Image (cartoon, rainbow, N blue to C red):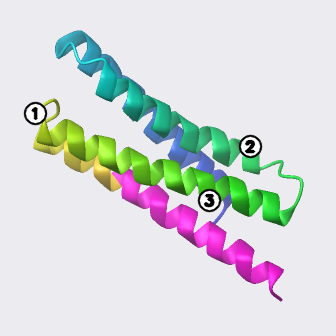
Amino acid sequence: MSKSILKDKSYAFVILIVKLSQFLVSEKKEYVLSKQLLRSRTAIGALIHEAEFAQSKNDFIHKMSISLKEANESMYWIDLLKDTGYINKKQHEASLQKNKELVAMLVSSIKTSKSSISK
C-alpha cells in the first residue's frame, strides 16, 4: 500500500472528524468527548506524516504502530459518542468505516515493513 494513499485517506478522515467535532461543540454543546476524538484522530495523520521521514525502518514501524494505537482509541471515542446519543447511527457508521479502513491500511503497512526487515 502506498504511503501517499494512506496519508491522503488519513487527511480526508481528519477533515471529517474536525467537522464532526465542530458539529458536536456548536450543536450538541459537547466538549470533552469531541476533544478526545479530535486529539486521537489528528494524531494518526500526524504520525503517518512523521513516519515518512523516519530515521530507520524500525523508527517507521514504531511511528506507524503508535498511529495504529491512536486509530484504535478513535474507535472507542466514536462508539462512545454514538452510545451516549451525541451522534446518530449514520454519523457513527461513516466514521467507524473510515477508521476501520485506516486500521487495515496501517496493519498492512506495519506487516510489510516488518517482513522486509526479517529478509
Left or right of 89: which side holds 50? Answer: right
Please tell me which residue lies in front, 26 or 74: 74
Dot 3: within a 10 Å radius of its alpha carbon, few (fewer than 14), some, or many (20 or more) residues? some
Q: Which residue carries the number 2 mark?
A: 50
Q: Which residue is drawn at the image coordinates 22% and 41% (left, top)?
A: 80
Q: Earlier in the sequence, mark 2 or mark 1?
A: 2
In percent of width and height, residue 12 lies at: 48, 39
* Image mark count: 3
Say which of marks 3 and 2 sits in front: 3
What residue lies at 83% left-to-right and 48% top-to-bottom? 53
Q: Is residue 87 above or below residue 114?
A: above
Res. 20 visible in picture: no
Instruction: Name which residue type carries label 2.
Output: Glu
- Residue at x 88% of width, y 60% of height: 56
Expressed as whole percent of the image width and height from the top left, the position of residue 77 reads 31, 41
- In the picture of the structure, the residue carrying the numbered disc 1 is 85
Residue marked by disc 3? 65
Q: Secondary structure at mark 2?
A: helix
Q: Nearer the viewer, residue 65 or 105?
A: 65
Region rendered in magenta: 98-119
Q: Is residue 11 left or right of residue 15?
A: right
Considering every residue shown, the one lying at the far right of the view is 55
Q: Which mark is residue 6?
A: none
Question: What is the quadrant of the N terminus in the image?
Answer: bottom right
Residue type beneath disc 3: Ser
Q: How far from the left and from the top, in percent, is residue 57?
A: 83, 65
Q: Is residue 54 above or below residue 40?
A: below
Q: Is residue 57 visible?
A: yes
Quadrant housing residue 114: bottom right
